[in-house]
Image (cartoon, helix red, strand yellow):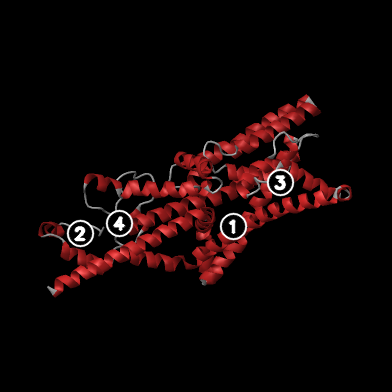
Amino acid sequence: MAHSDDRTGLERSRIGWWLFVALLAAVAAYLAWQFVGLLVLGVFGYYATRPISDRVGEVVDTDWLAAGITVLLVLVPVIALSLYAGYQLLLALQGFLAGSVDPLALLGQYFGLGDVSLAERQSLARALENPDEFLTNPRQKVVTVVQTGRTVVSAVAGTLLLLALSVTLSYFLLKYDDDMADALRQLFGGRNTVAYAYATAVDTDLKSVFFGNLLFVAVMSVIAGLAYLGTNLLAPAGLEVPMVAVLAFLTGAASLIPLVVGKIVYVPVLALLAVQAVRSSGSALAFVGATAVVYFLSLDFLPQTFLQPYISGRHLDGIMLMFAYLLGPVLFGWYGFFLLPIVFVAILEAVRIVLPELLHGERLTLDASMGGSVGSDPQSEGDVPSDEYAENRFEERDPQSSADDDTGPSDSSPSN
C-alpha cells in the first residue's frame, strides 16, 4: 500500500513539473515572438559565418577569439555595407520619384517612423537647412523639431540596438555552439535518436542555405562590380553606371532569389544606359545592346546555371527557396526574409524524417524515408553509433533478427 502511495505521489510530482515546464515553454515562446526579428537575424548571422569561424578556430585554437574575429571582420562589415547600400538606394529613389512617393514613409512602417508625417519631416529638414526660420516662429519650430527629432532618434537608436543585440547573439552562438550541441545531445537522449537526427539535418540545411547565401552574395557582388566598372571604362561619352559599389551589392543580394537573380537591378541599369544613349547619340544604343548581352550572361544565366546550384543551398531546391524568400517579407515583414527559410527547413526535414512513419504507424528511424534528393542525409551528417549503444541495441533485438548475424551486420533501430 505504501509502495502504491509513493508511486501516486511520484506521478503527481511529475505532472506538476510537466505543467511548470509547459508554462515556462509558453512564456519562452511569447518572448521569442516579441523579439523574433532579433532572434532570426542572430541565427542568420551564426549560420552564415559558422564555417568561417570554424576555419579561424583552427588557426587561433580559441573559441571566443575565433568568434570575435569572425563577427568583427565578416558580420559587422556585411551589416554596415547593407545599411549603406540601403541608405544610398533610398536617396536615389527619393530623387528619382521627385516627391510623388515618399520612400521614407514606406521604410518608416518597419522602423517606427510611421507616426512622422511627410510634412513634419520636410519641416524638420527645412529647419535644419535654414536655421533662420526659427526667428519667424521660434516656438512652433522648436516644438516640431523636438517632437520629430525625438521620434527619428528613437527609431534609429532602436534599429542600432536591434543590430547590436543580433550581432551579440551571433557571437554567443559561435562561441558556445559546441557546448549547446552537447547539451542538446544529452537532452535528446544520445546521438542515435530520431530527435538528434532531425536536429542534425535541420542544422546542416540551415548552414548550407545561409552560408551559401552569404558566399553567393559576395561572389555575385564582385562579378557585378567588375561588370559595372567595365561598363564605365568602355562606355562612350555620356554613358555611365552610377553608384557602382551600391548597385553591385544590391545585384548580389537580389541574386539570392532564383529566377529573379540580378534582373531587378541590372535591367534598370540598362534602361538608364539606354536613356543616356538616346540623349547623347543614337549610335551608343549598339553599346547598350552589347552590354545587355554581357549582363545577361554574367549576372543572370551563368550564375543561375552553375554558381547558385553549387554555392547557395546545395541540399535544397532553388525554387522552394524562392517561395520562402519572396513570401517571408510579405507574411512577417523584413525579418520574414530570414524566418520563413528557417520554418521551411524545419517543416521539410520533419516531413522527410518523421511524417511517413507516423502516418504508417511504423517505428521511427534515422533514415529520411522520402525526398532523398532534397535536404541533407541525417545519418551521413551524424556520428557513427558508439560501441556501447550498439551492444545495448544488440541485447534488445529479438531472436529472429539475430539470425541474420551470420550473413552480415544488421541495421540497428534508434530510440524514438
Res. 162 mark: 1
Closer to the observer: label 1 or label 2?
1
Taking the spot 81% from the left edge, 49% from the top edge, the residue there is 140
**Contact (Cβ within 8 Å) of mark 1 with mark 2:** no
Q: Quickly name the residue at label 4.
A: 194
* Number of other residues with Cα within 10 Å of mark 2, as a class: few under 14, some 14 to 19, many 20 or more: few
* Number of other residues with Cα within 10 Å of mark 3, as a class: few under 14, some 14 to 19, many 20 or more: some
Q: Earlier in the sequence, mark 3 or mark 2?
A: 3
The CA distance from mark 4 to mark 2 is 21 Å
Q: Position of residue 153 (x, y in %)?
A: 70, 55
Q: Quickly name the residue at label 2.
A: 409
For this rendering, which residue is in front, 289 or 156?
156
Q: Earlier in the sequence, mark 4 or mark 3?
A: 3
Q: Quickly name the residue at label 3.
A: 88
Q: Residue 140, can we see it?
A: yes
For this rendering, which residue is in front, 98 or 157?
157
Q: Quadrant of the N terminus?
A: bottom left
Q: Amino acid at mark 3?
A: Gln
Q: Earlier in the sequence, mark 1 or mark 3?
A: 3
Q: Earlier in the sequence, mark 4 or mark 2?
A: 4
Q: Earlier in the sequence, mark 4 or mark 1?
A: 1
Asked which secondary structure carries label 3, the reply is: helix
In this rendering, the answer to whether 281 lies above or below 129 is: above
In this rendering, the answer to whether 64 lies above or below 403 is: below
| Residue 348 shown left or right of residue 404 in the figure | right
Q: Position of residue 199 (x, y in %)?
A: 37, 57
Q: Amino acid at mark 2?
A: Pro
Taking the spot 82% from the left edge, 51% from the top edge, the residue there is 139
* Number of other residues with Cα within 10 Å of mark 1, as a class: few under 14, some 14 to 19, many 20 or more: some
Q: Amino acid at mark 1?
A: Leu
